[in-house]
Image (tube, helix red, strand yellow):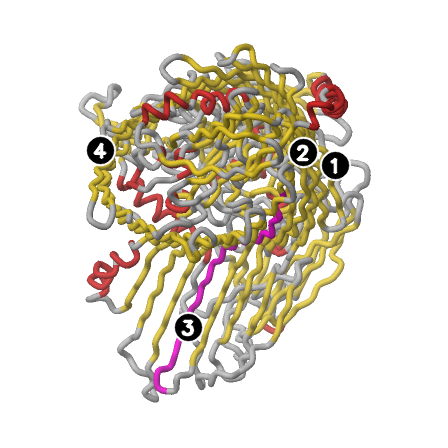
Amino acid sequence: MKIPRIIVHPTAMKITTKIVDRTTPKIPGKIASLTTMKITTKIVSLTVVVLAVMIHAGCERVIDYRGPETEPKAVIYALLEPDRLISVTVSESHSVFQVPWQPRQINDATVRVYRDGDLLETLAYKSPEPADENAPVSPYSLYSSVTNKPEFGHTYRIEVLIPGYPAAYGETELPDPVDVEVADTSSSDIGYGNRQLNVKLRFRDPADEENYYRFTAPATMGNYYAFPGEPYDPGQKVYIRIDDLSYGALSDPIISPMQDDDIFGIYPQNEYYVFTDELIPGKEYTLNLKYTGFNFNTEHYEFLRASFRLNSITRDLYLYLQSYSVYGQTEGNPLAEPVPVYTNIINGLGIVGALSFSQDSLKIGDYPVEGVQYEMQPY
Amino acid sequence: MRILLTLAFTALALSLPLEAQRSTAGSSAAAARVTVSGFVTDAGSGERMIDATVYERASFAGTTTNSYGFYSLPLPAGKAELIVSYLGYSPDTLVVQLSRDTVINFSLVMSSSEIAAVTVTASGRRAKIESTQMSMIDVPVEKFLKLPVIFGEADVLKVIQLLPGVQSGTEGSTGIYVRGGGPDQNLFLLDGVPVYNANHLFGFMSVFNPDAVKSVQLYKGGFPARFGERLSSVIDIRMKEGNEKEFHGNVAVGVISSKLSLEGPIIKDKTSFVISGRRTYYDVLAQPFIMKFNKNQDDKTNAGYYFYDLNAKINHKFSEKNRLYLSSYLGRDRAYMRNTYRPDFQGESGERFEYKDGFGLGWGNFITALRWNYLISNKLFSNTTLTYSKYDFDVTIESSVEELNSKAKGVDYFKYFSGIEDVGAKIDFDYYLSPKHSVKFGAGYTFHHFKPGVTTFRFDSGIIGDTGLDTVVGDMKVRASEFIMYAEDNIDLTPKLKMNAGVRLSLFNVQDTSYFVFQPRLSLRYMATDDLSFKLSYSKMGQFVHLLTTSAISLPTDLWLPVTRRYEPPVSHQVALGSGFLIPGDLEVTVEAFYKTMDNLIEYKEGAFFGGTGAGWESKVEKGRGWAYGSELMVEKSYGKLTGWIGYTLSWTQRKFENLNYGNTFPAKYDRRHDVSLALTYKFNDRVDAGLVWVYGTGNAATLGASQYPGGNLFAYDSRYDMITDFPGRNNYRLPSYHRLDLGVNLHKQKKHGVRTWSFSVYNAYNRLNPFFVYWGERWVEEPDPDNPGGMIYYSKPELRKVTVFPIIPSVSYSFKF
């Protein structure tokens, strides 16, 4: 068992801290082994128990669905980025009563890209890579351009026509990137032998416009596994891992505005790390990123290469990511109001969005170093 | 709307000259006018009677007693025949020669003959029709105690759910939704003090103990100016005062709780008290089962739930003009779980350890009111009240390990606390200018203390050298001041047209921001015939608190929060048009139509599913508006062996939020097209009476999708995918209709020291499986593969499943009244 720890984040909320008056004799050499009890679990458990008892006392019956018939629609996913060829995945919706439903590759759709109202290109269907014959068929049919990359200052319309379905389309344009820089990094002791890497990422929100952002942080890191105080052994390997360090932003109030308040863990986590400039309109802001346990021993050739990206995203993409994230986290919860996933597709479903980003990098340690053995870890 | 406002103030302005003209025209007569005033009380208990009718036969002048049983009736000097009546009591008639202002107190005797009461109290029955007040229902307490109820527990709010214009929430719960309003738009007043959380047992019982309740009035519209601070309803509940004459009591044992009530004089005819308490006992009854469960376990667990509440009131009559009341309510719910583990192993030095985990969840109200009734003159009645109301909710978690030899102990402690606390003072005046003109006015101040969420952490690891931690987070106390003033003028403009016009001024100050809400009110009544009236009302209401609550279920975590700069005071406008008339068979019929708009409403953002915790709540909610309209019919029979009512509501309730449902209008969760209720009691004789309730309602709205599509491959293109359900719109689907029949019978028997009553009831007598909620489930299907003879295919087939929580539920309870 481990000691329960609830980390208190400094925020605008008033925090008063004092040292415990030691009136109780201590247990020499022993760490108190206490059971962690999560409040969320307890309250939800209690509610579920109450409901379960009630439901158990009652009963469950299958009833007829008396809603309107649902017609299948085209589903479009397109994310436009600078310097990337335009690609679109196409799929379709189906009635829940259409069983057994089998996904299919839609290779006969017509997918057109318009730029500022003019036809730019009709995308070509791209067959999926040959897979094991027992592998499930992907429901996503890929259509991609061989020449066109989106450019700033233009409106792009993606139009999909699947035979038998009404033509569906969505529009977007590339948002301008917002410069970002690593303003400061530090490492701090957070107790019990743990260290924390703190990164401050600074940017200025453009004034007089609504802006939507997403934070991402692709990273590569190398770790050498050794006991404390053990010297470097050239015969041991440094293990390389590719990771996404976006989660470090969850300690920032603009990414998780209710982090201190949300002690019950009641509100869906911001799993796509999206935010708006509603609280920082036209102002400079510094994102505080925290990475508990990050302590790279450069004498052991441990290293970190991280790119901290501030993605400017379209409003539609923001709404889609936010609603899709919340949808996934509340699906099946009878206490939650169901969440419709946002779509900007006319006559269809899905999303046509765009992003652009600027980034700053952080490097700790040298990599690669001659004579050091490296091995890539699968995760 | 502007026309109505203009009308209201024109009428108000006209009323004063009218009154002046009357005084001038009848100046000679005025000199010969006298005022009869006094109190109407129950002869058996000395309790003052609210809304008793006082009528003078020759002059056709009449009035009703106020909330403290006081009446004042200016009359011409000379011979007068006064008739005083009240539902269920034998009327009292007194012929007097009036030569000067006179105080006459009446004591009414409870009628032993229902027929006699019917014959003589026609004027009493007309009082409701003649009143300017519309959209108000006086819930007959004595009657609702005879109605069948779930688990045998009579509940004020569950009876209110049976009234037209009121939608119930989740089945079995005490949630009420009045004319399209939300659960936070109802003002529960217990002896004039707001009750913030009216729920016990996770919302399945209300905090109002029927044994302590004297009267219940529900206002759905046409709000008099003396009421405010909520958009949709006022539930004005008055506690009993205590028998001034002799001691009485009541003991009741039910399926869920047991109750004890005592009342009696401390000084006969001067000071009396009433005290009433109840407690559940599942936690006690469960102990043998828990002990059995623990018998062969390494760790011992104890868990339980209980609630208790206590109502107490004492009043003292200093003189006929001075009376003091002190009333209090204390109630608390608590759920808990404790676990103790003492392992067999010992440490290297013989240490032995004991581990303890504990979890507690509690909530409760404490309210108290000190009230002073003072009769300034026989025309001017005053009531001064000091109030205190507190609601709090807490979660406590504690884990500890103790070394049993040295008694050294490490403790981790967590406590979350939130609440609201009000301290207030108000003064109200009733001024009776003439039988045709009376005025109410008053002012008040309330100091609100919101504690949206305070968290305490305390860690003491028990390790030498470890400093531990004792921290308080989120100590975001918010203080707010609220001032109100009101005046309402009740006047007969013509012999047929009567008006109650008023205005309420509210000023709310919070965090250096002030909000002023001007709330005009107007009610007009036109008597077409002696037994038929038409009524029209307009009310603007404002409120300064929000309730953060889920739409699915009422939980103690629901938070009361003040308005802010971002979320301004919700405001409603309501217009109602109605008619009341008597028809043969002693039936009173009320028909009303209403239209209501509500602005600055808040709701949780999509995806939130549990209560909030305070600071930062603004980022969790959306602001929008709503509107509701419909019509209501109520046919009521208040006299005779058979009493009760039939109610019908036809209504629409809509919401529109910019960031919910793509900004499109959607029906509110409890938008129901039709609601029908039938509530009847029949008294066979003094030993047997029976009750019947039948309700029907259009199914609640629910959000349900019937198509799916692959989602979530924007950042990864592979063959993995999740399916998204496409919801056509919020609350787009109608659940199956709701209906049920409840039956009950009460068997009374006179014993040596009192009356014992066995109550038997059946909830949902024909076992209608009403939906609590619906969801998509799956059924695994194995069937021959049509494309592969001899082969089988396997797949899951979706099924829409309805979950029913309350099937047929019989119950029994026992009570003894002495």
Question: Which of the labelled discs sits on residue B400, or is there none?
Answer: 3
Tell me the mark number nearer the camera, choosing from 4 and 3: 4
Question: Disc 1 on helix, strand or loop?
Answer: loop
Decide if residue B690 is on the left or right side of residue B400: left
Badge 4: residue crowd in 10 Å (few <14, some 14–19, many ≥20): some
Q: CA distance from mark 4 to mark 2?
A: 69 Å
Task: State if disc 3 and disc 4 touch (CB < 8 Å).
Answer: no
Mark 4 — residue? B688
* Both marks 3 and 2 on one chain: no
Residue B484 spot, x, y in % from top left: 69, 42
Q: Is residue A244 visible?
A: no
Q: Position of residue B605 (x, y in %)?
A: 57, 38
What amino acid type is highlighted by mark number 2?
Arg
Which mark is on residue A210?
A: 1
Main SS of the magenta part reads strand
Q: Point out the tag, 1 or 2, that comes first from the N-terminus.
A: 1
Cα–Cα gap, marks 1 and 2: 8 Å
- Nearer the viewer's eye, disc 4 or disc 2? 4
User: What's the CA distance linking mark 3 and mark 2?
Assistant: 49 Å
Are the residues at dot 1 and dot 2 in contact (C-beta closer than 8 Å)? Answer: yes
Nearest to the eye among marks 1 and 3: give it. Answer: 3
Q: Amino acid at mark 4?
A: Val
Residue wearing tag 2: A315
Mark 3 lies on a secondary structure that is: strand
Rounded to the nearest angstrom, the CA distance separating label 1 from label 3 is 50 Å
The magenta-colored residue range is B382-405
Is B267 left or right of B116, judged from the image as shown? right
- Name which residue lies at 20% across and 49% down: B752
Magenta-drawn stretch contains B383: yes
> For this view, does B313 lie left or right of residue B615?
left
Q: Which mark is residue B315?
A: none
